[in-house]
C-alpha cells in the first residue's frame, strides 16, 4: 500500500478500519472513510471543514455504534473494504495518475469519495461539496477537471445510453475501447515528450496537455473505468504475437514522432466508431479531438522550429523504390508492403499516364502504408499531388518544375529531389537547394528509355564532388549493385528489379544486404 498512497492516506485508511471495528462492521464502508477524514488533520480535512462537514454533522447524520475520536484504539480489524470503498480507492488511483502524481493524496481520496455514489453522498450534496470543485485543486489549471456528476446505470456502470446488444458483444466493445484508449495515451505521451524535451516548445506542449486532459475528462464521464479495466485480456490478445520488422525500426526522431501521431489518430478513430454503440456524446468528443489532433499535426509540421519532424532524414535509407502500377506483377499495394519489409525505406509513386483522381487515391493508400512502417513517401513530378496525398516530398526531372517552384507548392518542410545526368546538373541542384539527387542513368534500364547513359563515371564523379544525399539509378539490380558500390555509390534507386520480381520482398532484401554489407 505504501507504494501507491501517501503517509496521510495510509493513516486515514488505518483509522477508517478502526472506526469500522468500533461501529461493529464487518467491512470498511464509505461512512467510516468519511469519519476518518474528518478526524484527521490533512488537506482533505480542511476542505471538509470549510464546507461544514465535521464531526458534529456526522454524529447527527451518520452515527457509529461506539463513540469515535482520533485516538480510538482497537485490537482487531474488519475483514476488508466494502465494494463501494474499493471503487473509491480505484477512482483515487485513477485521479492520481491523471494529475501526474506518483502517489494518491488525501485530496485524491476525497475527490473519489465525493465522486462515487454511496451512503455519504447526501451529506456532500447538502454541504454543496462537488467533485468538480476538488478537481480544480488537484488537476492542472489548463485541464478540464474530471467531471463525475453522472447518472450511472447501476446494472452496467455505463450511462443510460447502454447498448441493447448481448453482453458478450458489449464486453468485446469495452475490450476494443480499452486497447484503443491505451494506445492513444501512449502515443500522446511520446509526442508530448518530443515537443517538451527536444523542441522545448511550450505552446505545443500546452496544447497536447490540454488534449490529454480533455480526453481523460470525457472518458471518465462516459465510461466506467473499472469495468473498462476488467475487460482487458492481454494474455488472449492475438495481436500481441503479430509483429513486423518495421515496428522495431526507427531511423530517427522523425520516424518516432510520425509513427506516434499516426497511432494517436488511428486510436481516436477506433474510439469514435466503437463508442457510438455506447455513448454518442463521447463519440462526438473523440471526433472533435481527432480533428484537433490533425490541426496540431499541421502546426507541428509547418513550424520551422520542428522541421526535423516534417522533413525526414535520408541517412540510413540506402534503398529507394520507384513503383509504377504497370510494372508490378502483383497488386501495387502488396509490392510496396513486401518491398518495405525487404528493406526499402523510400517509396516514390511514379504514374505518368494515370488520371489525377486515381493517382491521388493510390497515393493516399501508399501514404498510409509508408506511414505505418516509417518509410518515406515521395510523389513523382507533381508537387500539387504531393500535397494532396500528404507525401514527404516530390521528385522532379530536368524538364519539370524547378526546385524553387516545387518548394513553393509543397512547403519548406517537404523534401525536393531532382534527377541529374551530369555533374553540372548535380551541382546546380545543390545550389538550388535540392534535398537529394538522382544520379544516372547508370545502366540501360528496362523501365525508362535514354539516348545516353551517364554511367559509372558519373557515379564516381558525384561520389567525390557532391555532399548532399544521392541515389544511383538506372538498370540497377542485385547483380549490378556491386559495380555501383565499387564506384562509390552506397544508395540506389530501383524499379523493375523489385516491381517485376515474383517475390518483391526477397528481391529488395538481396539488394539491401549488398548495400549494407559493402
Image (cartoon, grey):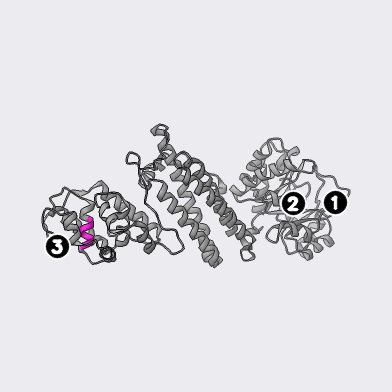
Residue 502 in percent (x, y) is at 68, 36
| Start-end of magenta stretch | 33-38
- Residue drawn at 69 percent across, 58 percent down: 414
**Disc 3 versus disc 2: nearer the observer:** 3
Q: CA–CA distance between discs 3 and 1?
A: 96 Å
Residue 458 in percent (x, y) is at 81, 57
Residue indicated by mark 1: 453
Q: Is residue 37 magenta?
A: yes
Q: Which numbered disc flags the more N-terminal residue, 2 or 1?
A: 2
Horizontal side of 236 relative to 272 (left or right) equals left
On residue 17, which mark appears?
Answer: none
Q: Nearer the viewer, residue 18 or 143?
A: 143
Q: Which numbered disc flags the more N-terminal residue, 3 or 2?
A: 3
Residue 20 lies, with reference to residue 412, above or below; the image says above
Q: Nearer the viewer, residue 192 or 369?
A: 192
Classify mark 3: helix, strand or loop: loop
Residue 155 in percent (x, y) is at 33, 38
Q: Are marks 3 and 1 in contact (CB under 8 Å)?
A: no
**Disc 3 versus disc 1: nearer the observer:** 3
Residue indicated by mark 2: 384
**Disc 2 versus disc 1: nearer the observer:** 2
Horizontal side of 78 relative to 124 (left or right) equals left
Residue indicated by mark 3: 69
Classify mark 1: helix, strand or loop: loop
Q: Nearer the viewer, residue 197 or 219?
A: 219
Amino acid at each position: 500500500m505504501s507504494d501507491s498512497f501517501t503517509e496521510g492516506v495510509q493513516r486515514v485508511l488505518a483509522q477508517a478500519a478502526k472506526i469500522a471495528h468500533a461501529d461493529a462492521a464487518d467491512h470498511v464502508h464509505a461512512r467510516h472513510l468519511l469519519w476518518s477524514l474528518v478526524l484527521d488533520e490533512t488537506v482533505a480535512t480542511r476542505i471538509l471543514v470549510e464546507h461544514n462537514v465535521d464531526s458534529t454533522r456526522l454524529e447527527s447524520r451518520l452515527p457509529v455504534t461506539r463513540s469515535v475520536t482520533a485516538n480510538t484504539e482497537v485490537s482487531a480489524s474488519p475483514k476488508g473494504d466494502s465494494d463501494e470503498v474499493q471503487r473509491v480507492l480505484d477512482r483515487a488511483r485513477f485521479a492520481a495518475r491523471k494529475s501526474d502524481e506518483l502517489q494518491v493524496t488525501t485530496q485524491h481520496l476525497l475527490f473519489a469519495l465525493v465522486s462515487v455514489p454511496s451512503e455519504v453522498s447526501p451529506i456532500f450534496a447538502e454541504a454543496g461539496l462537488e467533485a468538480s470543485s476538488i478537481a480544480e485543486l488537484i488537476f492542472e489549471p489548463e485541464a478540464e477537471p474530471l467531471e463525475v456528476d453522472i447518472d450511472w446505470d447501476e446494472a452496467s456502470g455505463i450511462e443510460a445510453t447502454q447498448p441493447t446488444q448481448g453482453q458478450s458483444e458489449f464486453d468485446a466493445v469495452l475490450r476494443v475501447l480499452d486497447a484503443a484508449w491505451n494506445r492513444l495515451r501512449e502515443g500522446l505521451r511520446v509526442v508530448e515528450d518530443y515537443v517538451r524535451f527536444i523542441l522545448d516548445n511550450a505552446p505545443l506542449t500546452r496544447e497536447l496537455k490540454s488534449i490529454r486532459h480533455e480526453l481523460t475528462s470525457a472518458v471518465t464521464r462516459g465510461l466506467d473505468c473499472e469495468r473498462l479495466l476488467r475487460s482487458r485480456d492481454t494474455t488472449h490478445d492475438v495481436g500481441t504475437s503479430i509483429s513486423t520488422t518495421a515496428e522495431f525500426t526507427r531511423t530517427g526522431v522523425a520516424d518516432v514522432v510520425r509513427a506516434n501521431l499516426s497511432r494517436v489518430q488511428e486510436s481516436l478513430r477506433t474510439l469514435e466508431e466503437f463508442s457510438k454503440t455506447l455513448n454518442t456524446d463521447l463519440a462526438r468528443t473523440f471526433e472533435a479531438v481527432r480533428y484537433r489532433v490533425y490541426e496540431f499535426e499541421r502546426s507541428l509540421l509547418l513550424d520551422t522550429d520542428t522541421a526535423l519532424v516534417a522533413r525526414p532524414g535520408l541517412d540510413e535509407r540506402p534503398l529507394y523504390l520507384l513503383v509504377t502500377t504497370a510494372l508490378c506483377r502483383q497488386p501495387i499495394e502488396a509490392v510496396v508492403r513486401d518491398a518495405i519489409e525487404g528493406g526499402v525505406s523510400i517509396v516514390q509513386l511514379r504514374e505518368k499516364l494515370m488520371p489525377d483522381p486515381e493517382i491521388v487515391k493510390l497515393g493516399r493508400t501508399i501514404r498510409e502504408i509508408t506511414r505505418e512502417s516509417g518509410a518515406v513517401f515521395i510523389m513523382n513530378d507533381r508537387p500539387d499531388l504531393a500535397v494532396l496525398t500528404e507525401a514527404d516530398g516530390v521528385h522532379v526531372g530536368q524538364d519539370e518544375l524547378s526546385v524553387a517552384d516545387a518548394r513553393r507548392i509543397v512547403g519548406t518542410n517537404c523534401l525536393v529531389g531532382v534527377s541529374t545526368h551530369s555533374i553540372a546538373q548535380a551541382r546546380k541542384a545543390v545550389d538550388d537547394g535540392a534535398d537529394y539527387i538522382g544520379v544516372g542513368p547508370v545502366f540501360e534500364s528496362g523501365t525508362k528509355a535514354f539516348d545516353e547513359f551517364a554511367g559509372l563515371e558519373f557515379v564516381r564523379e558525384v561520389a567525390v564532388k557532391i555532399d548532399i544525399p544521392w541515389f544511383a539509378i538506372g538498370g540497377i539490380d542485385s547483380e549490378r549493385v556491386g559495380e555501383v558500390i565499387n564506384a562509390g555509390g552506397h544508395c540506389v534507386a530501383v524499379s523493375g528489379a523489385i516491381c517485376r520480381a515474383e517475390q518483391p520482398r526477397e528481391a529488395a532484401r538481396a539488394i539491401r544486404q549488398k548495400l549494407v554489407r559493402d
